[in-house]
Image (cartoon, grey):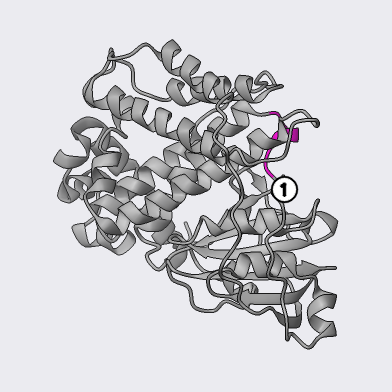
Amino acid sequence: MSRLSRTQLQERNRARVLAAASEEFAERGFRDAKIDAIAERAELTRGAVYSNFPGKRALYFTVLADLAERAPEPPNPEPSLTPREALGALARAWLARLPLTTDERHGLARIGVDLMPEILADERTRRPFAQLTKLNAILLGLALERLRPPATPDGRLMRVAEATLTTLHGASQLAAAAPGFTDPFTIVGACERLAGLGLDDRWPSTPWIPRARPADEAWSPPPAVDAVRGEPARFTGGDGDGVVAILGLHRLEAAEEAVRAAPAGAAVTAVLVTGDPGELAPLARLAVTDFCGCLRQAFPPSAWPRLQVVFDDSGALAAAAGVLAVSDATEAAVRVEAGRIVVRADGRGACHTAASTPGEAVAGDGGRSARSSAPAPGR
């Protein structure tokens, strides 16, 4: 038998650690789980565990993210035709993933009950999680807007989306802290009624408009997966032309600026980067992947938002866009036309600038100007 390469050995050890950690967390819960016990289950040393994961919390987030990515989805969910129907279907998909009152205190079904306490315990996780939840609200709001009848007046549905996620996250917390407190059908009915709320939700103007810079660079991104659709992301060709936003986990709300400012039909891709890939990257995968699984069950493909979300743990995709150093505060964006980068912008407001400035507009004035007015709400 041939010897494993260093990379193959590392991948095998990582898989063994994840399998052992999943068993340990399922049996003991996060708080009582021990790194030494995980190493013993994996038949590795304590040092081998830490060489793959910076700490127990990072390992916990990774286990939960892997479970979310492998979660089965119904093969043929019934299509939702109205925002009310979609919110009801979303609530049912969300609640179906919560542990039952009859589940054991520990076990695979209850492995995630310690997630929120761990997020709340540290500002380093609270702030990214707030932005990840905001990104999920953006995805939900955009999908709801695509289900509205054509005669419906334009306007955002982000506040409805935020109210829905507030309700569902509250249900999750009560399912863990007070099992059986409320009937799931009550939660479903409440979410359905949120579709009819008039919340005067208007898209505000964007006060930060950095200058667009002309570019003429090859665009050759590495393969990646779109978390919204669960399929390979499209970066080149007709559907791939548009806006690519490189966003740190403190700036995810800027994805909406790119969508609202981009021309109708243009693809928009949010590339998620972080300065802490060991711990925050799996948290991002968990939060977005878990929600998008519910979104796909609740909305027909025709209503899925025109926003791709891609995880870039290594920074390779950001580097392909010319962003060589990333952090949780990163906001940079490029405009792609005919498979080439023609506009770039950096800093707060970069998503709006790149999305609203065609390549010829910047090339024509030498990059001296960029559009500064926010467009009307778009879908």
Give the number of callouts.
1
- How far across and how far down the image is residue 224, in percent? 63, 56
Q: Is residue 278 above or below residue 333?
A: above
The boundaries of the magenta stretch are 300-305
- Neighbour class for label 1 at 10 Å: few (<14), some, many (≥20)? some
- How far across and how far down the image is residue 376, in percent? 71, 52
- Residue pictured at 53% horizontal, 33% vertical: 160
- Residue pictured at 57% horizontal, 27% vertical: 73
- How far across and how far down the image is residue 291, in percent? 50, 37
Image quarter in which the C terminus is found: top right
In this picture, residue 282 sits left or right of residue 359: left
Of 92 and 375, the residue lying toward us:
375
Q: Is residue 95 above or below residue 330?
A: above
User: Label 1 belongs to which residue?
Assistant: 378
- How far across and how far down the image is residue 28, in percent? 18, 34
Question: Is residue 31 part of the magenta span, yes or no?
Answer: no
- Residue pictured at 71% horizontal, 22% vertical: 81
Q: Can residue 107 be seen in this view?
A: no
Q: Name the secondary structure under disc 1.
A: loop
Of 363 and 102, the residue lying toward us:
363
Query: Which picture quadrant has residue 14?
Result: bottom left
- Residue pictured at 55% horizontal, 38% vertical: 292
Specify the amino acid type for callout 1. Answer: Gly
In this picture, residue 191 sits left or right of residue 16: right
Question: Is residue 301 part of the magenta span, yes or no?
Answer: yes
Q: Can residue 77 be seen in this view?
A: yes
Query: Which picture quadrant has residue 87?
Result: top right
In this picture, residue 154 sits left or right of residue 68: right
Q: In this view, does 11 lie above or below 198?
A: below
